[in-house]
Amino acid sequence: MVRTNVSPNDPVDEHPTIGLIGMGAMGAMYANLLSKAGWKKISVCDLPDKFDSLKLQYANVPGITVHKDGHAVSRISDFIMYSVEAEYIDRVVAQYGPSTKVGAIVSGQTSVKAPEKDAFDKYLPRDVHIVSLHSLHGPTVSPEGQPLVLIQHRAPDSSLHVVESIFRCFGSRFVYLTYEDHDLVTANVQAVTHAAFLTMGTAWASQRSYPWEQGQYVGGIETVKVNIMLRIYANKWHVYAGLAILNPSARVQIDQYASSATALFKLMLAGDEEGLHARVHQAREQVFGTAKAERAPIFLTEDVLDQFTIGGDPKLNGRLSPTGATAPRANSHLALLAMVDCWAHLHIQPFDHLDLAATPIFRMWIGVAEYLFRSSERLDAAVHSAVYDVTHRSDDLEFVIAARGWSQCVSFGSLELYKRRFLETASFFESRFEEASAIGSEMIKAISQS
């Protein structure tokens, strides 16, 4: 039996055997971090046809043993984590679950927990314990200080403490939720946030241009929009598809986001500045009026964010900061207005989720929303620009069309349709991914420390 306070510094014969089924980006991240921490008995596997390449890849990595399949991992492991796509979790657990070692602790790293819970309850033997988890960040982000959700579903406290001991080396912040609360929180924190950036990308791709290279969407808030959009499209499509389609709460929120964007755009077309002003200020009061006044703002200064502009730091290139020396170019910021309007209509308090389980992307997104909405001057300028400045009107039209398209795609519940829509947009931005990934990582690090 594994001690509840076991650590990597204990003798090897006291280490639990840690099993990882699925060695995609997140599974590999877990394996590498556990090995680096000093755990000596890590058993991993992926698809059988990847056995030889995986064995070669981890031949010289301390503590890691590669197995042919999940049966071999399940039979010997004291702790087992399934790191597979939510779409396939039922099939994989049905295949390997019956081989689980008696008394083992089983977990899952799926981003949507409803399918995982159903699979575990259906296929895992009754003599094993279930303590699931979910790191609320991507594989390229350091886990230190990031939320790591722990779900004590079918297990005594001792099993929960074993899991805590195994992952204490990550330096993450443990967040304790139920399966149901997890899916609601991740819908609030991730799904609709991703939808906003997916919509931006589709809108820009539809115009067949990189607007930030033409003097638009440069500096400050725009830097965050562009970097995160590129970061999302550089990732795997299934990461976002599962969150959107397999999580019932997410569908409602993505639909509301499209509805909010449409309603605000209609007010813009009607020239109804008074109506638009009233709607966005009502949303502002509902979302930001209850936030703790003493809480430090998230958003960094525009001068700092300008350093992360795609194409390099404008100052370092001998040019003036696009926001430091002159006023930012007028913009309706429809994506942000729609986001806060969506939160208000769904009675979501984003700061509650910020304190509980915010992802790096959500932290940045709420930060730029706060930056815009906490300043009456900036917010009123956005409203005025939305009604009277047609510079971005064609972009806003494409944005509304894209938002409704993504909402409809999710409502169909088709992962294949989602994949096609995602990859078509991603292919347009592919040439910019490498630079955006490096710059985006630095930006996330800077804002996370703010």
Image (cartoon, rainbow, N blue to C red):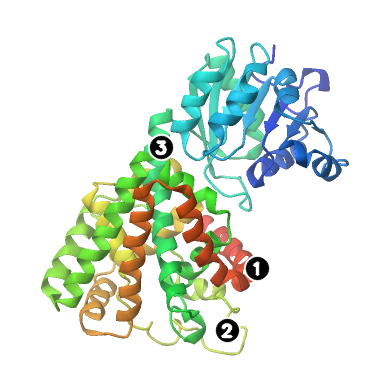
Picture disc at residue 315: 2
Under circle 3, the secondary element is helix
Q: Is residue 354 visible?
A: no
Q: Which amino acid, mark 3?
A: Asp
Q: Is residue 364 visible?
A: yes
Instruction: Name the residue rendered at 77%, 42% in the picture.
Output: 50
Spatial separation of the CA atoms under disc 2 and disc 1: 21 Å
* Quadrant where the N terminus is found in the figure: top right
Residue highlighted by disc 3: 183
Q: Residue 206 occupies which quadrant of the picture?
A: bottom left
Tag nearer the camera, 2 or 3: 3
Spatial separation of the CA atoms under disc 1 and disc 3: 31 Å
Q: Which amino acid, mark 2?
A: Lys
Label 2 or label 3, whichever comes before in sequence order:
3
Q: Looking at the image, is 394 positioned above or below residue 447?
A: below
Label 2 or label 1, whichever comes before in sequence order:
2
Q: Which amino acid, mark 1?
A: Glu
Instruction: Name the residue rendered at 51%, 65% in the picture.
Output: 424
Residue 270 % position (x, y): 14, 76
Residue 13 % position (x, y): 82, 18
Spatial separation of the CA atoms under disc 2 and disc 3: 43 Å
Instruction: Name the residue rendered at 61%, 36% in the picture.
Output: 83
Mark 1, Cα crowd under 10 Å, few <14 / some 14-19 / many 20+, is few
